[in-house]
Image (cartoon, helix red, strand yellow):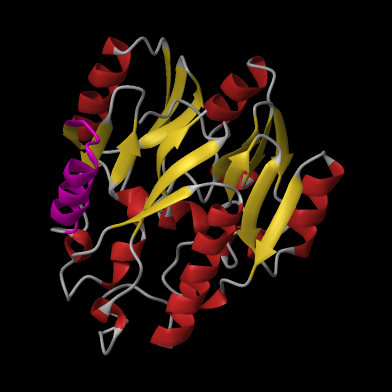
Amino acid sequence: WGVCSEVDKLKAVLMRRPGKEVENFDWKAARFRAPIDPEKFRAQHDALADVYRAHGVQVHYVDEQRSDRPNALFCRDLVFMTPEGAIVTRPATEARRGEERYAAKKLADLGVPIIRTICGGMWIDRHTVILASGVRTNREGYEMVRYELERMGVTQIIHMQIPYGHAHIDGLVNMASHDVAMIHASQVPYDVCDALKKKGIKLLECPSRNEAKETLAINYVAIEPGLVVMPAGNPRSQELLEKNGIKVIPIQFDEVLKGFGAMHCCTAFLKRG
């Protein structure tokens, strides 16, 4: 097990196939944007898992979960993988609390070492990580993760303040290859962009606010450097990625998007490289 990149060859992931928790739930209380069709919801999630398997990725599932946690499919929120093992989160939002217990149990069953239980971030390279604070993560959690990563040899930690109205790093900035990233330009702080450019990373500005905010074009997953799977319905963003040498596998994900998450949110990386 181990991860120190967002783009190295993806080999194993942890996911939660939506179960009874997505049936007859209060979509407003769960912070979904609209009611969902549970079968369509599951089918789109299955399609993503099938893409992973077709590219040689092992898909592991969190088999148990609370019946009142319809957001539990967003496993990226629950597990941040490091070179030494997993950091399991304790989500700050009340609607997500308790999900981590079952993610931790599955990690233990798989034999994945659990380093701590706190919050997550985004790898840039083996020595560089973006860590965010915001509605999901307070500064105390941030400092705990920073301590663990510096102990593992990370030398540059880029702090990113998540703007009001957003919850995730991966809806605002994401790596497509070792030297290409896409950003929601108006929502990513200058210091973060400057740090990435100084590392030689080309920043592609998502060409559509609607695609960035509504159809989550930036919330893709790199299966390997230069190959990403992303939500269908983002033609301008897909074209920009492809013009910059990134191959794109679009899949229909509109039902899952009603939960304000896409591929990256659904996928906890367990092994890369």
Res. 90 visible in picture: no
The secondary structure that dominates the magenta segment is helix
Q: Nearer the viewer, residue 151 or 51?
A: 51
Q: Residue furthest right?
A: 243
Q: Residue at x 21, y 34 (%)?
A: 141
x and y, in percent, of residue 176 in the image: 65, 39
- Residue span colored magenta: 99-115
Q: Is residue 136 left or right of residue 240?
A: left
Figure check: 28 above or below 148: below
- Residue 139 figure quarter: top left
Q: Is residue 113 rendered magenta in the image?
A: yes
Figure check: 116 above or below 240: above
Q: Is residue 203 left or right of residue 186?
A: right
Q: How many marks?
A: 0
Res. 253 visible in picture: yes
x and y, in percent, of residue 184 in the image: 61, 47
Q: Nearer the viewer, residue 101 or 238?
A: 101
Q: Residue at x 53, y 55 (%)?
A: 53
Q: Is residue 76 rendered magenta in the image?
A: no
Quadrant, the N terminus: top left
Q: Nearer the viewer, residue 231 or 223?
A: 223
Q: Residue at x 78, y 63 (%)?
A: 235
- Residue 165 figure quarter: bottom left
x and y, in percent, of residue 240 in the image: 80, 49
Q: Nearer the viewer, residue 185 or 93?
A: 93
x and y, in percent, of residue 198 in the image: 65, 15
Q: Residue at x 20, y 26 (%)?
A: 144
